[in-house]
Amino acid sequence: MENATNNTEVHKGLEGVIAASTKIGYVDGQAGMLNYRGYDIKTLAEQSNYEEVSFLLLYGHLPTREEYNAYATKLRELSKPDEDVYDVIRKIGAKTHPMTTLRTAVSIFAASDKAESSENLKDQEEMAIKLIATLPTIVGAIHRVYSGKEIIAPDKNLGYAANFYYMSLGVRPDPMESKIMDTALILHADHGMNASTFSAMVTISTLADMYSSVTSAISTLKGGLHGGANERALKMIQSFGTPAGAESKLRDMLERKEKIMGFGHRVYKVYDPRAKILKQYADYITQKNDRNLYETANKVEEIMINTLGSKGIFPNVDFYSGMVYNAMGFKTEIFTPIFAVGRISGWVARALEYVSDNKLFRPKAQYTGERGPLKYVPIQER
Ligand SMILES: CC(C)(COP(=O)(O)OP(=O)(O)OC[C@H]1O[C@@H](n2cnc3c(N)ncnc32)[C@H](O)[C@@H]1OP(=O)(O)O)[C@@H](O)C(=O)NCCC(=O)NCCS
């Protein structure tokens, strides 16, 4: 085998490089399969809930009844952050993108933890649980303030997803709305070594704390190539107006070789299993209103599959998630923070897994600059 130190081949974006081992989740892009700790995503979406899935990701097994009760109770007890966090969210208001507010709010939240800088694994695990417990409250508060409304405290009688819905939208969800919210969070909980998860792992590999790791991940998720696609997919479908509008405008876009948001995936070359599940819920939730939006999306899907399906281009998770959140009443700018609420479990589970058998991340870059040594010219002579 070639010695890694002498290997001069550049893997741009680390594409194809295997940099860690994991037991947390597996994606098979050819088979359209995603599993968490060996459990198929479809089964978890149908039969589990977010509390159980986050336990599974963190601890590697489905909880017993006792473990579940203790974990779910702990999440509820830890769900309300200090007033400082709310104050900062109010102070920022609608001045910035909610992802910026989220990053700042998590930093303020860290300040309330005396063990904030601890490298101890048990402390890191406690921070992970605090973050899972509090993120929906923080994002809910950001959504309220961003919409010009009063912040709502968690309701200890509601489950994780229902509480997030309530704190964000101000009404308690019916059982079906609660199930859809739960499913959306489960579907976003983990997805291989994606960019934000990788960021979380790089930060914790320096033995920085879990709060630092999660703020890195939030910053990385913010970008349009990662968390921002659902927002853009929804805006595109809305701009088509009707199925007939989609027919003409989409064909023009394809002729101009434009990338259609919500389609295609680096890993999946078949229908994204998460999109399949969300499509059913988008169908259900747009029955009351937004039917035209769903039918327009369906037209887009039909044209895209007919045109590009043979190249492995199918709807991805972002195509239908935005439509579901929109029909629930979430503002478009909050779609990426909702993604963060789902992904928090994957971030912390993978950061903990990595740091428990740690190796500082330190890839190399191929130097293509001047080798010199050049003659140094004093500034007055240049
Ligand atoms: C995700 C993405 C970056 C993957 O890109 P990729 O791995 O380079 O895609 P592929 O190599 O499989 O593309 C195969 C062909 O389909 C085209 N294609 C891929 N995604 C497309 C899209 N969304 N719209 C139109 N054409 C697309 C490519 O241009 C390529 O065409 P070519 O054969 O003429 O060169 C890309 O599909 C994309 O930008 N999608 C839109 C953004 C999005 O929804 N992101 C969220 C991902 S979860």
Image (tube, grey):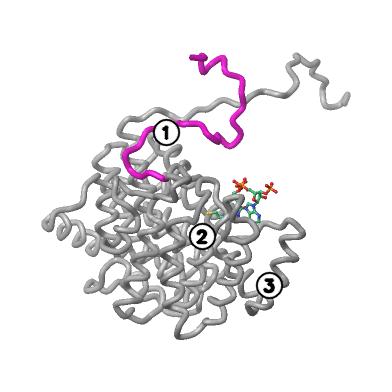
Q: Which of the labelled discs sits on residue 206, or is there none? A: 1
Q: Earlier in the sequence, mark 3 or mark 1?
A: 1
Which residue, given by chain and number where applicable, does mark 2 sit on? 99
Question: CB at mark 1 closer than 8 A to ligand 1?
Answer: no
Q: Amino acid at mark 2?
A: Met
From the top left corner, tell me how far across and down residue 257 is, in percent: 73, 56
Query: Residue 68 is drawn in which quadrant?
Result: bottom left
Distance, label 2 to label 3, CA atoms, is: 34 Å
Whether residue 77 sits left or right of residue 240 in the image: it is left
Closer mark to the observer between disc 3 and disc 1? 3
Q: Amino acid at mark 3?
A: Glu
User: Taking the image as drawn, is residue 341 in sight?
Assistant: yes
Q: Which residues are magenta?
A: 1-27
Q: Residues within 10 Å of mark 2 (few under 14, many from 20)?
A: many
SS category of the residue bearing label 3: helix
User: Taking the image as drawn, is residue 114 in sight?
Assistant: no
Q: How would you classify the magenta stretch by its main secondary structure?
A: loop
Which residue, given by chain and number where applicable, does mark 3 sit on? 247
